[in-house]
Image (cartoon, rainbow, N blue to C red):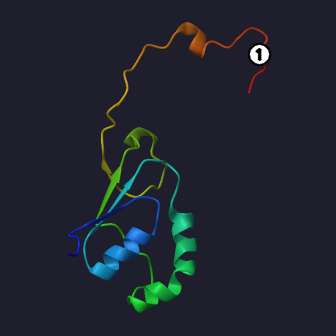
């Protein structure tokens, strides 16, 4: 049974698989690293496979879901649907020692 949808993250395999199966591809990532350079390198590496599928580029996602808050997404990042982060562990208040530089500590 073929899938109705392929979901992937950093790997380029799901993009190519979705194109092969002719189903939508959803990219879901959880980092803010720019992908353009990786995508260009992948196109070079996957050129024979892409040509067999009649493609010259990696397929663009039909939907891009990003956990990175819009306020800190890198400039020029592709448009994405934001996904709210929900903590899985209990959250605690920061104690003053956690954000205060110790005496005599060198600057970064």
**Where is residue 88 shown, x and y percent of the image?**
35, 31
How many numbered marks have been drawn onto this rendered protein structure? 1
Label 1 residue SS? loop
Vertical comparison of 71 with 4: above or below = above
Is residue 74 toward the left or the right of residue 22 in the image?
right
**Where is residue 68 shown, x and y percent of the image?**
41, 43
Vertical comparison of 84 with 3: above or below = above
Residue at x 37% of width, y 44% of height: 67
Q: Nearer the viewer, residue 80 or 96?
A: 96
Residue at x 30% of width, y 39% of height: 84
User: Which quarter of the rendered picture does the C terminus lie within?
Assistant: top right
Residue at x 57% of width, y 65% of height: 37
Report which residue position mark 1 lands on: 105
**Where is residue 13 shown, x and y percent of the image?**
43, 71
Is residue 26 toward the left or the right of residue 76 in the image?
left
Could you classify mark 1 by the number of other residues whose Cα lies within 10 Å: few (under 14), some (14-19), or many (20 or more)? few
Q: Nearer the viewer, residue 108 or 19?
A: 19
Residue at x 39% of width, y 40% of height: 69
Is residue 93 toward the left or the right of residue 86 in the image?
right
**Extreme-front residue of the structure:** 1
**Can you tell which quarter of the image residue 23 is in?**
bottom left
User: Which quarter of the rendered picture does the N terminus lie within?
Assistant: bottom left
**Can you tell which quarter of the image residue 17 is in?**
bottom left
Vertical comparison of 76 with 48: above or below = above
**Where is residue 35 shown, x and y percent of the image?**
51, 60
């Amino acid at each position: 049974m073929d899938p109705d949808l392929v979901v992937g993250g950093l790997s380029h395999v799901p993009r190519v698989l979705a194109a092969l199966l002719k189903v939508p591809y959803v990219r879901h990532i959880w980092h803010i690293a720019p992908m353009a350079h990786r995508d260009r390198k992948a196109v070079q590496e996957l050129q024979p496979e892409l040509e067999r599928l009649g493609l010259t580029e990696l397929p663009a996602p039909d939907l891009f879901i990003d956990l990175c808050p819009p306020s800190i997404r890198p400039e020029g990042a592709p448009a994405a649907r934001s996904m709210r982060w929900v903590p899985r562990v209990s959250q605690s208040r920061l104690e003053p020692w956690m954000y205060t530089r110790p005496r005599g500590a060198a600057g970064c």
